[in-house]
Amino acid sequence: MLQIGDELLCFSAAFLLVVFVTRSPSGATLVTGLLYVFMLMFRFSPVPTEQAALVLRPRARAGGVPVVAHRGGSHDAPENTLAAIREASRNGATAVELDLSFTADGVPVLMHDDSVDRTTNGSGLVQEMKYSQLKRLNAAAHHRLKQRFGVEKVPTLQEAVVECVRHHLTIIFDVKGQPDKAARSLHHIYTKFPSLYNSSLVSSFEPKVIYKMRQTDPSVVTALTHRPWRLSRFNDGTPRSRSSWVQLWMALLDVLLDWAHHHILWRLCGVSAVLVQKDFISQDYVEYWSDRGVEVLGWTVNSAVEKSYYQNQLKIGFITDSLVEDCDPQY
């Protein structure tokens, strides 16, 4: 729930911003009032705390915290494959994070990138390929352990869910876009596998995806994914634009987006968790969200030192590429 202090800060900031732009106190009062009414009418309440706890705090190693295998554990096995799900289970994961994409004929499949080039022996955009074409590709073709895993096909969403249910793994469905199609497909899966309501969550960088999911099925546990400065900088911190003016503008948008995530968007969508890039998480940050009834998960935590910090100091779940050894960070 949004605290009284949050509401005062949010609407006071909106009021002052409109006053600054319009020089009209009456106009600012009207706009702020409309924003307040909008939030009351269109925001979603989070799912019950007990349900969210089942998803966000599943069984973990004795004395440990939930450990989520990123893309099924992309260092330990070919990412987003059934082999990765099985390997994650063998290595002691409590959950797996899987990426949802769609073929040209609308089949929901597991794929992180827009194209199949990086992970398979094929080439082309996923959304331009029919599933009959996609299923002939080898999703283990470029993995460092390809000799061990041989041939792994790109699984459908349903195949992945069946495998996760078989291994009693919690699932984080990471959705990159196509909110309407994703919400319909996931709602169908939840209807077919009702146990997912207590063993999975839907996450996305895009608030519209989460809002559409809550609209379609308000019983689903959801999370917003966030990395500060995502619009203005690449994952490694380098600027996205060579133009100083463009870079400045994108940085300003990043500030606004960050503020919105922490004061409006999470409340509007009624999320139960935030998935945040590991470098921006501290004990104070965890407590900030805990005071609001929201869980924090860090990504991508790939070194033993970082994992120890999350397990013993922060005591929150984390997403990792490997459950067995150190590896380079992936985003």
Image (cartoon, rainbow, N blue to C red):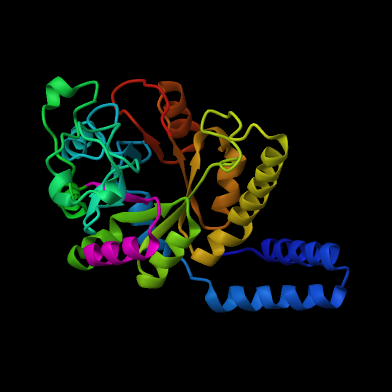
Q: Which residues are the magenta region? A: 169-190
14 magenta-colored: no
Name the foreground residue: 256 vs 277: 256
Name the foreground residue: 315 vs 137: 137
188 magenta-colored: yes
* Residue 25 locus on image (x, y percent): 86, 73
* Residue 322 locus on image (x, y percent): 31, 28
In which quadrant of the rendered view does residue 16 lie? bottom right
* Residue 77 locus on image (x, y percent): 22, 29
* Residue 10 locus on image (x, y percent): 70, 62
The reply to whether residue 166 is in sight is no
Image-based side of 290 in relation to 90, left or right: right
In this picture, is 143 found above or below 153?
Answer: above
The reply to whether residue 144 is in sight is yes
In this picture, is 240 found above or below 156?
Answer: above
**Who's the residue at 66% across and 49% down the image?**
253
Image-based side of 225 in relation to 183, left or right: right
In which quadrant of the rendered view does residue 331 lie? top left
